[in-house]
């Protein structure tokens, strides 16, 4: 198949933003160059060409809740994510009864196979189980379904749904002896710490046992204290831990975002978007006013990080290279030869998504960025 070449005023990352071009063949980046290409190219003009965004925590999109979604709803949601620049994601199931997960995962497996065969749909990297093994900071999760880590249940789940569960968020205090953390880590599942009031020492012990991520830093965890830094302090202090951040400017104060981003190079943006009622709102809340999820996808999160004073390269890296690395997908997240041709073109002023390619296929009919598209 002949290569398609795309030229942009700015490409990044890796490296600083620069004029460059990308050649694509059979869904793969086959060549990358600076300046203008030797032959003809599809010229994006002043747009920024970046890797596709990778979201490790998405609960649903608009009226679609991934826990209950039909096959048609899965397709609609994955296409909506793609049109907003999210080319790969981890559908996230919040805490529920242990008996309910098998059916949800069976539907998710069918949806993953379907999205892999359907051009223009975001790739499902694997499922993120957020709970139900939580501790003292459950947030909006149902208290009645929270249980200590059940090793027998986990082993049976991993046996039945091999290679489907990608991330499990749990609280160290709910994992006696950290046996679940070790089991999951050994099985190649990413263990994320969250919804926890663990002490700093307990969090470090969990990292020793194989935990590598801290879910939505600052949210769903005990506060930082100068004599007991807790999970927040461990996330910012231990380079083995990659914190994720919700950058909708509602879940975390801009000053806290700036402090965390300045401290840690390995921070990943997540949306934590949930299904909502279709009305414009800054975030989704429970009846008693607690935050229950976001409405801002990664396209706007990247723009928010730039607005806070970070470079466009750093903001894009937090939504691409870092989540790809922590999730173990070395063929995504950067514009490099041999990587999947998952790409987004951004307006240089507004940073809205103008064009999207998934495995080299141009995603059509992108009226505008954001979840309301």
Image (cartoon, helix red, strand yellow):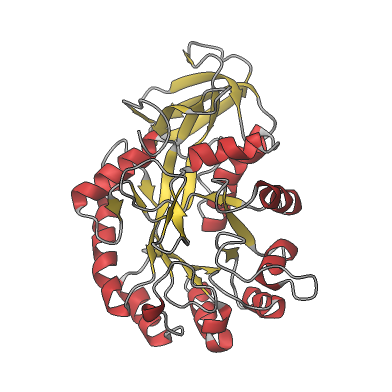
Residue sitting at x 48%, y 14%: 41
Instruction: Give the image quarter of residue 3.
Output: top left
Where is residue 72 shown, x and y percent of the image? Answer: 19, 47
Residue with the most extreme front position:
288
Q: Is residue 334 visible?
A: no
Label total for image: 0
Q: Is residue 173 visible?
A: yes
Q: In the rendered view, does 123 fall on the left or right side of 192?
A: left
Residue sitting at x 57%, y 79%: 172
Nearer the observer, 43 or 197 = 197
Where is residue 331 shown, x and y percent of the image? Answer: 50, 45
Quadrant location of the N terminus in the rendered image: top left
Where is residue 114 shown, x and y percent of the image? Answer: 24, 49
Residue with the most extreme right position:
227
Where is residue 184 shown, x and y percent of the image? Answer: 48, 75
- Residue 77, compared with residue 367, is above or below; it is below
- Residue 176, compared with residue 100, is above or below; it is below
Nearer the observer, 319 or 116 = 319
Quadrant location of the C terminus in the rendered image: top left
- Residue 37, compared with residue 162, is above or below; it is above
Residue sitting at x 67%, y 64%: 235
Residue sitting at x 42%, y 44%: 281
Nearer the observer, 348 or 259 = 259
Q: In the rendered view, does 358 fall on the left or right side of 300?
A: left
């Amino acid at each position: 198949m002949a290569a398609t070449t795309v030229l942009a005023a700015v490409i990044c990352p890796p490296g600083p933003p620069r004029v460059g071009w990308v050649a694509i063949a059979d869904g793969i980046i086959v060549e990358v160059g600076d300046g203008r290409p030797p032959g003809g190219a599809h010229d994006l003009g002043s747009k920024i060409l970046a890797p596709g965004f990778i979201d490790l925590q998405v609960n649903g999109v608009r009226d679609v809740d991934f826990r209950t979604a039909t096959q048609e709803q899965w397709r609609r949601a994955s296409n909506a994510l793609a049109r907003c620049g999210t080319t790969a994601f981890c559908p996230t199931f919040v805490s529920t009864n242990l008996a309910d997960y098998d059916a949800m995962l069976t539907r998710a497996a069918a949806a993953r196979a379907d999205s892999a065969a359907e051009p223009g749909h975001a790739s499902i990297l694997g499922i993120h189980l957020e709970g139900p093994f939580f501790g003292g900071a459950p947030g909006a999760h149902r208290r009645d379904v929270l249980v200590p880590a059940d090793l027998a249940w986990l082993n049976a789940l991993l046996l039945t749904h091999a290679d489907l569960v990608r991330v499990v968020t749990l609280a160290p205090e709910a994992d006696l002896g950290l046996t679940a953390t070790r089991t999951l880590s050994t099985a190649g599942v990413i263990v994320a710490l969250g919804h926890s009031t663990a002490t700093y020492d307990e969090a470090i012990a969990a990292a020793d046992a194989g935990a590598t991520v801290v879910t939505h830093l600052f949210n769903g965890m005990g506060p930082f204290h100068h004599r007991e830094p807790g999970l927040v302090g461990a996330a910012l202090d231990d380079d083995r831990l990659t914190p994720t951040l919700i950058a909708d400017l509602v879940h975390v104060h801009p000053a806290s975002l700036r402090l965390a981003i300045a401290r840690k190079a390995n921070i990943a943006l997540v949306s934590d978007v949930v299904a909502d009622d279709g009305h414009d709102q800054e975030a989704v809340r429970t009846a008693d006013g607690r935050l229950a999820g976001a409405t801002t996808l990664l396209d706007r999160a990247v723009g928010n990080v730039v607005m806070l004073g970070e470079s466009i390269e750093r903001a894009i890296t937090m939504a691409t290279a870092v989540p790809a690395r922590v999730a173990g997908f070395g063929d995504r997240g950067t514009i490099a030869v041999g990587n999947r041709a998952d790409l987004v073109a951004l307006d240089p002023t507004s940073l809205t998504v103008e064009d999207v390619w998934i495995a080299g296929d141009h995603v059509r009919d992108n009226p505008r960025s954001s979840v309301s598209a």
